[in-house]
Image (cartoon, grey):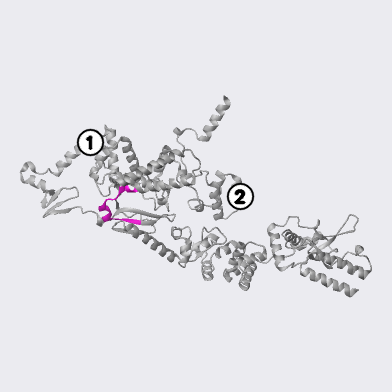
Amino acid sequence: MARTVRKAKAGAMAAVEADIPNGGEMIGVLAEAGAAAETGTAPETAAVAGNGEAVFIPLNKLKKSPRNARKTPHAPATIEALAASIAVKGMLQNLVVEPELDPAGAPTGSYCVTVGEGRRLAQLLRVKRKEIGETKPVHCVIDTAHDPYEISLDENVTREAMHPADQFEAFRALAEQHGWGAEEVAARFGVTAQVVRQRLRLGAVSPKLIQVYREGGLNLDQLMAFAITEDHSRQEQVYENLSYNREPWIIRRDLTKAHVPATDRRAIFIGAEAYIEAGGTILRDLFTEDRGGFYEDAALLERLTCERLECIAAEVQAEGWKWVSALIEFPHAHGLRRAYPHPVELPEDEEAALAAVQAEYDRLSSEHEGAEDLPPEVDERFGELEAEIERIDALCHAYDPDDIARGGAFVTLRHDGITRIERGFIRPEDEKPAVEEVGEGVRINGDGEIIEDGAHDEQGNAVSALDAEDEEAGDAGRPLSDLLVRDLTAHRTLGLRLALGEQPDMALLAVTHALAAQTFYRGVDAHALDIRPSSVLLDGHADGIGDTAAAKALQDRHAGWAADLPRDVVDLWGFLAGLDQASVLALFAHCATQTVNALKLPWDTHKRRAHETVERLASALALDMTAHWTPTVRTYLGRVTKAQILAAVREVIGDEAADRIAVMKKQPMAEAAERLIAGTGWLPTLLRTERPAWLGAPQDEAGASEAAADAAE
């Protein structure tokens, strides 16, 4: 009989190993049968297993112990990890249980889990996923001798977790020894593939730095910063050169100093795919938002960028320009005169095409006026019509062939990686000569006056041929002395000043002429008013400002005026005199805009009153910088302290939002603040404008006043 029972037990154990459904019930039945055979008692009166015995108990007979010291529930991620581990490697640790007793003290047939509640929950999760049956046998040890509360507390307290460095290196070893990818390792440990990749990257840090981390010389954030590259020698070099400031961002900055961030204009222009196809590699930071990583081969990226810009430059030069320069950044201090395209008559066929396209555009606009959503085919047709109108409009202005033959263009990149093409620049050596030979001994100067060699006045100054002829005619034709010329022109200047002050409309015309002559006609001194406009280049003070929408609007306005003005400054006065006053005022305002200077520079400490005037000008103009500037990580939030970031969020969103991000590190905090502030219209103090009195109360106050008035009625 005993041999039969042992044989049956062996069969039950085989069923357990094979994970046969109801294997647990087989064990229970066979255990009871064995107990009955050996003790002579019936199965229903079999004794409960004794203290210290190891038994297999069906999962559905295990319950959470009310005397478990752990009250805080296990995290879902922990249960997931345990379930994945058990599925692959089985139950590595047994559960400690005690029999459940009814109020009378009799066993109920179930057991309370004193130690191993997390593993029980993991198995229940596997049941829910239909990986195992609910009667799956679980290896348990019976403990009725100790206080369940004490041993559950002991199990959670008296232990030491593995050092993270050991974990990182173990993950690395598993991946290398077994050839497992991040996904496979993740499945075996119940974590995400991203977590595995991070641990593998940390395990790839230089063993010297791992040891420093073990000894407490580096914290985890600093170790993660070193993990941005797998070059051990570079990691160790940066570590040796660190000063007292060992902030993670400094470590990352030093490690990527020779690399190009993916946000760089060159990286955006070339793109990751083309760069990788050319043999380049991209360094990725698995622990922070790296915005596309870092391009390791800066020389390759530079070469690819220059080659592509040269191809575009060749297409531009095919238009007939004398030269085209391909550069990554626009040379703002080029010092070249610029010619602009001027209006030209359209060919008859283009005129007819423009009229037809415009008529169709107007008809479609009228038919769908007020419609919220256009049909796809109508929307597509609008796009085609707009493109055709733009093409024909471009033909309405053209560069002078002489300017094309002598001028050139720059092909550069905008801050956002978009190609920028600027045409019409004339180099000094390509300018028309100031004096041209028109005959033997006869020349014409820049003003069109005829000059003969050897014809000079008594002071040695060259005189025109006509003056020379008059001098030969006698004393009546002799030129006036310099002293007399000065005397007479001084009186004329006084008369002009008096007369100009009495005619404001002419004063406006004269000032506009002086400003326009110097704004649009470089190197020409053809104005009667001694007004010298000065314009500060802003590109050297704010990176990428030349690529903003505001800069583009100003450039387009300038180009529009340049195209309308006469090519010769001699004709400028007549052109201005023929404009209506609104147009003169518009040109005057545009020229005045070029002289505005609100820069605050650290060495300009004596300009306090000038800055006060700037504030008054902004207030008078009701300047709203929210239309031209937005606080982002790049423009502001990433360039100020954490305290200033929190102050901005607190001001516009509230204390609760600021407190939520206060625990973050600098870069994530700046990114979170950008999302919170977006669309609120918040501006730093330097960009705020005091509301002018003539605008009245703000909209919210005005609304409140109206509501109060309505309530009073």
Of residues 621 and 456, the one drawn nearer to the viewer in this rendering: 621
Q: Amino acid at mark 1?
A: Leu
User: Which x, y percent locates residue 203?
Assistant: 60, 68
User: Which x, y percent locates residue 404?
Assistant: 28, 54
Of residues 138 and 212, the one drawn nearer to the viewer in this rendering: 138
Residue at 33% of width from left, 36% of height from top?
Answer: 582
Q: Secondary structure at mark 1?
A: helix
For this view, does 416 lie left or right of residue 28? Answer: left
Numbered disc in front, either 2 or 1? 2
For this view, does 319 lie left or right of residue 600? Answer: left
Q: Mark 2 or 1 closer to N-term?
A: 1
The C terminus sits in image quarter: top right
Residue at 52% of width from left, 71% of height from top?
Answer: 233
Q: Which residues are magenta?
A: 394-410
Question: Is 699 located above or below residue 179 in the figure?
Answer: above
Q: Secondary structure at mark 2?
A: helix
Q: Which mark is residue 690?
A: none
State how far apart marks 2 and 1 are (Cα).
69 Å
Question: Is 355 located above or below residue 224 in the figure?
Answer: above
- Residue indicated by mark 1: 496
User: Which x, y percent locates residue 476?
Assistant: 7, 41
Residue at 43% of width from left, 66% of height from top?
Answer: 300
Label 1: how many residues lie within 10 Å, few (<14), some (14-19) or many (20+)?
Answer: few
Q: Which mark is residue 660?
A: 2
Q: Amino acid at mark 2?
A: Arg
Q: Is residue 422 magenta?
A: no
